[in-house]
Image (tube, rainbow, N blue to C red):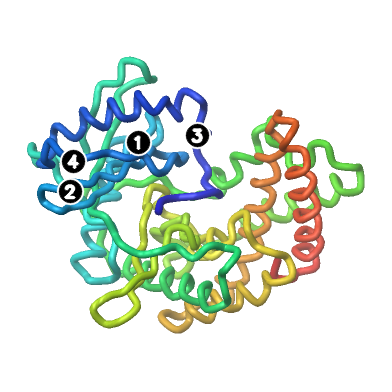
Amino acid sequence: METGPGESGPAITAAEAMSAERVLGLAAEAMRRYDFSPRATLEPFTVAPGHVALRIDDPVVDERAVLRLHHPGRHHVSELRSELLWLDALLAGRVMEVPPPIAARSGERVITLDDPDGDGDRHATVHGWLEGEAVPHAAARPSDFARLGATAARLHAHTASWPRPAGFCRRSWSAARLLAPLDDPGTDPAAGADPESAALLARAEAAVRADLAAFPCTPDAYGLIHADLGLHNVLVGAGPAGEAVRVVDFDDCGPGWFAYDCASAFAGAEPVGDAPGLVAAWCEGYRSVRDLPPRNAAQIPAFLMLGRLTALGAAASSPAPEAGPARAAAADLACELAERYLRGEVV
């Protein structure tokens, strides 16, 4: 249900992932602050860069919810509260279905747990459960990417007119933040590549850096974005008027380029041959809801290339021997995308 590849932030270490026993212990402590019955059960179902998610099933009140244990240092409490404020606004404006925040008995919607075995206090939030299924990448069709584009457009249209509440703060997806993984010497996309491939990837990286430096941060191109709006975070199910689209996992939301939400739709999974058609489908879906200026659409290839370079750098940093074939495949794909990107094509 929640989050996936392509996020830029603290890596999940073994300590962050935690043991199942520790996760359940912290989750049980959190549950005592809410109005769930003693018969409510907890089941971990996602370990993400920002949090561990557990499903709550309460048979007494026939209620299902999601408890998120946020990793220390990922977000300040004020940032988590700001995320919930955006969810409130989306729900109040009936923009789309998103996970409704649930308050603890104290009224707090972000609670703090003592984690003596961790790296500091751990924050937790609880949300109502949303029914629906995510479309697997292997089964996705152009219409599914058109749906993603239309969903992104609805979010962007809302944020363009939504006055931020006092104290609202989310870390921005600035060029510096997006490029940070490539600035880490331990995640060099060209590591292990032959000289010709390394040179090609270096040219592509230089072009991405130049593009990002030139992209304007004007209101028509830059605003509050989801930043992980892929198939894995869009649930499709039945609704009162037919098909309902529900968006989950706003953990990465923050100010950024609108075009970045297109690239996040393809993070780590786009087949080269289909990419132009799928990007065109995304753009068509977007335009069915909101104008997509040509200058914004022209930014998409740079973000797609950046995502591929970042994924390749992450693969190159893995010491596991079994990761070798995956690294080789990622390098081949990155080189093919780099050639197309440098020719000015949609990658």
Q: CA distance from mark 4 to mark 2?
A: 15 Å
Q: Is residue 268 left or right of residue 85?
A: right
The total number of labels drawn is 4
Residues tagged 3 and 1 counted as in contact (Cβ below 8 A): no
The residue that disc 2 covers is: 102
Residue 40 numbered tag: 4
Q: Is residue 221 visible?
A: yes
**Mark in the foreground, 3 or 1:** 1
x, y percent for residue 60: 11, 47
The residue that disc 1 covers is: 70
The residue that disc 3 covers is: 10
**Sooner in the amino-acid sequence: mark 3 or mark 4:** 3
x, y percent for residue 17: 45, 30
Q: Secondary structure at mark 3?
A: loop
Q: Secondary structure at mark 2?
A: strand
Instruction: Using the image, determine if residue 38 lies above or below residue 139.
Output: above
Q: Residue at 29% of width from left, 43% of height from top?
A: 80
